[in-house]
Amino acid sequence: MEDGTSPTSTRKDQATCVADDRERDGALASFPFDRMTAQRFRQTFPRARWSDKLQAWTVPGKTARRRIDRWLAQEAARTDVFANERGRDAYAFEPILSPYLEVDDVGFRIRTPYSRTVVEELRQIPVARWDSDQRIWRVPFASYDDLQRRWETIEEAARRNEPEERRKRIDARKGTAEEQRSKRRSAERRRRRLPLPCDDLPPVGRPVATSAYGIVVVTEITGELADPVFADLYPELMDEHVWCHWELPTLGELVHTWPAKATPGRYERMRSWWQPTIEELREARRAARSRERRKMRPEALQED
């Protein structure tokens, strides 16, 4: 595309810049569209190419992600020349004092134990980004107000996921009915099976959203009736449900999955599967990228 535009890049509701690993020798980049930003991007990355399939720019090179992160940080600083100063002043007047937060010249560095709540909260903060090299979240001064509003939830979730706190909860659950149910749930997930209505089964080999395990790919429909003894793990289980085997979808499968035009209705929820929404696909794609990066790390270490 000669002018660096794309039909889907004009979304005005996208408030953050994103850079994601695509492969070891390249990375993806997407950002809210305007013509001048696209021109600056093309000048900085002359070898970048737009992908209609991925709806993102592909930048080649082993250091692509690092260079994209640096460019995104520069672009974030351009959005409002006074925003960073206002955020810096706001922090000086009413600072966040926490062992999980540090300050440097460009903004905030956030390092916490892993928590899905922390990740979800930080993703809602404009221009917040994950630095995979240092394994921290970076938030510019310009986003301080948003960070401050969400910090109580972030810090509470971080404390709850400290190793010592997790061990305390595990010890408190030992021997209880809750622990037994948790073990049954874990064992059932390892079986990679799911009860679904025999008269309305999902397509085999295509990603679908499920109420039990998120987005999965059904690989086999066994025809074996699901045992009612598992009704506590599968609230929708009924007499005509049969077992289906599933696996997690790959990033490629998720990229090629069209989102549903509407959220699932009551019937789709009752049958336990539906066409995934765009929000569900985005979350699943992020998880799939993380899985693929983890698989690549051992290979990179061997080559080094």
Image (cartoon, rainbow, N blue to C red):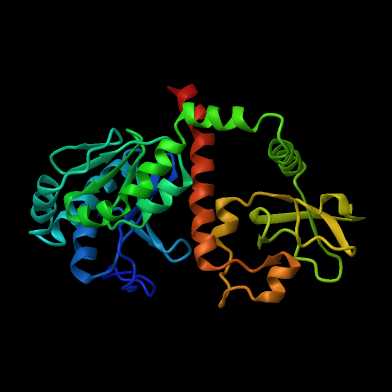
Instruction: Give the residue drawn at x 75%, y 65%.
Output: 203
How many marks on residues? Answer: 0
Residue 51 vertical placement versus 233 (above, below): below
Q: Position of residue 142 (x, y in %)?
A: 17, 55
**Quadrant location, the C terminus:** top left
Classify residue 3 by image quadrant.
Answer: bottom left
Whole-percent x and y of residue 53?
Answer: 48, 64
Residue 58 seen in this snapshot? no
| Residue 57, image quadrant | bottom left
Taking the spot 50% from the left edge, 56% from the top edge, the residue there is 283
Drawn side of residue 35 relative to residue 115, left or right: left
Is 58 or 132 nearer to us in this picture? Answer: 132
> If the image is split into quadrants, where does the N terminus sit?
bottom left
Q: Give the camera-side residue of 26 and 294.
A: 294
From what the image shows, is residue 2 above or below residue 102? below
Left or right of residue 2: residue 76: left
Residue 162 drawn at (x, y percent):
44, 31
Q: Is residue 274 above or below residue 125?
A: below
Seen at 37% across and 46% down, the residue is: 154
Q: Is residue 217 left or right of residue 55?
A: right
Instruction: Estimate the x, y position of residue 66 in percent, counting from the top left.
Output: 29, 41
Residue at image location 51% in from the left, 36% down from the top: 294
Between 246 and 48, the one lying in front of the other is 246
Q: Is residue 295 visible?
A: yes
